Image (cartoon, rainbow, N blue to C red):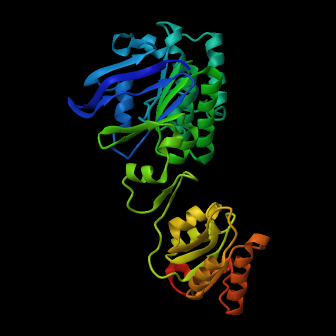
Amino acid sequence: MDTWYIRTEHMDVGYDGVPLIRNIEIGVRRGEILTLIGPNGSGKSTILKSMIRQLKLLAGVVVLDGEAMAAMKEGDIAKKMAIVMTERLRAELMTGEDVVATGRYPYTGRLGILTAADKQKVREAVALVHGEDFADRPFSQISDGQRQRLLLARAVCQEPEVIVLDEPTSFLDVKHKLELLEILKKLVRERNVAVLMSLHELDLAQKISDRVVCVANNAVDRCGTPEEIFTNEYIEALYGMEAGSYNALFGSLEMGRVAGAPRAFVIGGAGRGIPVYRALQRRGVPFAAGILAENDVDYAVAKALAVETVAVPAFAPMDEGAFDRAKAVMLGCEHVICCLDGFGELNQNNRQLRDEAAVRGKILPVSRLSELWTGGGAG
């Protein structure tokens, strides 16, 4: 693999001469995505701004393609590095395409005149971010998300070897978040670009990053692969989470469980129970769940949200002990919600629970949840 394309050596960053984070040693290779994550105010943007010379280094050096950036000319840096930051660009009287075209200025000479080849690269960059429908409109009159896509097009148009992005998905809807990240992956794979960015969305950082840098408590706390970084325990500690939980399996956050004796028992499995768990949590209803295998997709969410979860080990058959525990909990609940339409050979204990609940008149159809517990009241 290539050596570091951009890296820091003993870098201290901060404001007004006061260090915020000291001795930063990070780097990204071409063909790789390195993502900074961490709590708000931890210093992610400060690190990026210092690396691209928007902030003056307090100590250390940033090396770009083997050369200290402090000794490089702006034009030489611009041919190697493109920047997409969150600050609003003042672009009065410029169309979106005009803004994208500024990515060609490192190559146009002092007069800034675009050749036919330059204009073609501008069009290609606009098409890459699906911006054809609004690129001819005034840049100041398009949405934040559209501006963000055109700023990425400007960076692409610059033909850089490294792209630095600060929270690039902040103003984008779900569709365009995914499109932007796919574009970055394509640039990494096909053009061997290095990508250095910060992200708030942990699920996206987990899925797109080759390596992750964690920033917290005025320090670079950890650096590693997504598999090394994204564990339930570490992410909860990194962000100091006191309410709710993080689920590394799904790359998602769950709200905190509702305290109290369970009022409903949910028979779920194979993902069918998850929407019901979350609906009960939203309505402030404490509930229990079971019987679930520990490798069932429902299990992790049930453990996060249910007051009690009756489970059996992965790949093990249901056992009488689990059935007796589940039945005892179920009989103490006002209602039983069965999310399953059928029961396989290894799931007969849950069928028995459903039948027992039906005999006792406890079955509550999923469709009636909102009727019974709107605002957390009992039905």
Q: Position of residue 154 (x, y in %)?
A: 54, 25
Q: Position of residue 117 (x, y in %)?
A: 65, 11
Residue furthest to the left: 17
Q: Position of residue 368 (x, y in %)?
A: 65, 81
63 relative to 225 in the view: left or right: left
Q: Position of residue 322 (x, y in %)?
A: 62, 76
Q: Quadrant of the N terminus?
A: top right
Quadrant in the picture for residue 90:
top left
Q: Is residue 117 above or below residue 298?
A: above
Residue at point 55%, 38% (across, down): 142
Residue at point 49%, 18% (across, down): 3
Q: Does residue 169 appear in this view?
A: no
Quadrant in the picture for residue 292:
bottom right
Please count the marks in the image. Answer: 0
Q: Does residue 355 appear in this view?
A: yes
- Of residues 291 and 201, the one drawn nearer to the viewer in this rendering: 291
375 relative to 348 in the view: left or right: left
Residue at point 44%, 53% (across, down): 233
45 relative to 159 in the view: left or right: left
- Of residues 122 and 271, the one drawn nearer to the viewer in this rendering: 271
Q: Is residue 197 above or below residue 291?
A: above
Quadrant in the picture for residue 88:
top left
- Of residues 125 and 101, the one drawn nearer to the viewer in this rendering: 125
Residue at point 44%, 50% (across, down): 235
Q: Quadrant of the C terminus?
A: bottom right
Q: Is residue 149 above or below residue 323?
A: above
